Image (cartoon, rainbow, N blue to C red):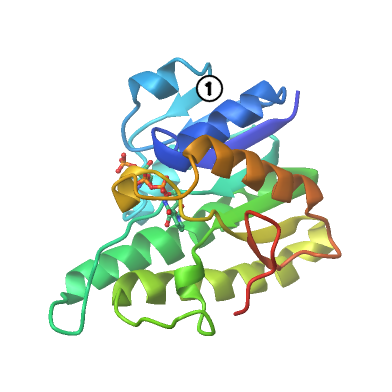
Amino acid sequence: MPSAVITGANRGIGLELVKQYIANGFQVYGLCRKNSDALKQTGAIVIENMDLSSADAIQNSLKKLKGVGIDILINNAGVLADESLQSMSASSIEYQFKVNSLAPLLVTQTLKEQFNPGAKVGLITSRMGSMADNSSGGRYGYRMSKAALNIAGVSLAHDLKPLGTAVAILHPGYVQTDMVNHNGDISAAEAAKRLVNRMNELNLTNTGTFWHSNGEILPW
Ligand SMILES: NC(=O)c1ccc[n+]([C@@H]2O[C@H](COP(=O)([O-])OP(=O)(O)OC[C@H]3O[C@@H](n4cnc5c(N)ncnc54)[C@H](OP(=O)(O)O)[C@@H]3O)[C@@H](O)[C@H]2O)c1
């Protein structure tokens, strides 16, 4: 049975990714800070207490995956704070960097030894980390941390290619989750379905591409 490891599995897009991969016949490992009733019902193996802002918590949680061969890793968890030039705090920006940029890199680096041949990594980023797409400013910590994730994704694509692992840098769309007060234009289930399609199309030729979940290639 192929395996999929998904962060931020307890709610939102991560929860729907868990459901999709289980429906597709995967053994899913759902990583989160705290389990949810919805995640419990999926049948995923749940690893809790994974606070992605803590390098120690990340390593302690990943130890529980020791010996598991991994086919799909999706670094989905993320956090959004709404800084403006008038109102921002260094700690909030640093926190977003830890969760949105550094954690996906640490998780991928730690788990790479466990990747099966042909394994694939998805980084759930945002088009808000695109320079070319930034027409409205603001959201400093989120934009900066997702831009940092994007460049980490390009380096990972280069570095993991010789191992046969491809990396997708994926904007999910504007999705109806807690992060955007459910104001999105697609459901989390629809976003997860599209993201799984993009992961299915991912290969060593198109590795390192920045995609919208609808298949459009996004500008850096
Ligand atoms: N929704 C959108 O329109 C949209 C657009 C572009 C990109 N995205 C990206 O899509 C991904 C999923 O977001 P979503 O929309 O599903 O948001 P969400 O419903 O707010 O879910 C966020 C997930 O990230 C987890 N998380 C946050 N901080 C964490 C931490 N310190 N340690 C461990 N887990 C943490 C949350 O866990 P807790 O329950 O423990 O907080 C939750 O599982 C994120 O990377 C986000 O940036 C979303």
What quarter of the picture does the C terminus occupy? bottom right
Left or right of residue 215, residue 106 in this image: left
Location of residue 155 by image quarter: bottom right
Given the current orientation, which residue lies at the most extreme front position?
185
Counting from the top left corner in percent of width and height, residue 8 is at 42, 42
**Residue that appears at 27% across and 64% down:** 95
| Residue found at x 24% / y 67% | 82
Under mark 1, the amino acid is: Ala
Image coords of residue 183 (percent x, y): 35, 49
Rendering quarter of residue 72:
top right
- The residue closer to the viewer here, 40 or 31, is 40
If the image is split into quadrants, where does the N terminus sit?
top right
**Residue at x-position 42% and y-position 18%:** 40
Mark 1 nearby-residue class (10 Å; few <14, some 14–19, many ≥20): many
Q: Look at the numbered disc 1 and give the secondary structure of its residue.
A: loop
Can you say whether 190 is above or below 122 in the image? above
Q: Estimate the x, y position of residue 63 in percent, counting from the top left.
A: 49, 38
Say whether residue 192 is left or right of residue 82. Answer: right
For residue 63, say whether it is visible.
no
The residue lying toward the viewer, choosing from 219 and 4, is 219
Q: Is residue 39 above or below residue 188?
A: above
Query: Would you say the beta carbon of the disc 1 residue lies within 8 angstroms of ligand 1?
Result: no
In percent of the image, x 47 and y 33: which residue is there? 15
Q: Quadrant of residue 153?
A: bottom right
Residue 205 in the image: state x and y as whole percent: 86, 65
Is 28 left or right of 146, judged from the image as shown? right
The residue that disc 1 covers is 44
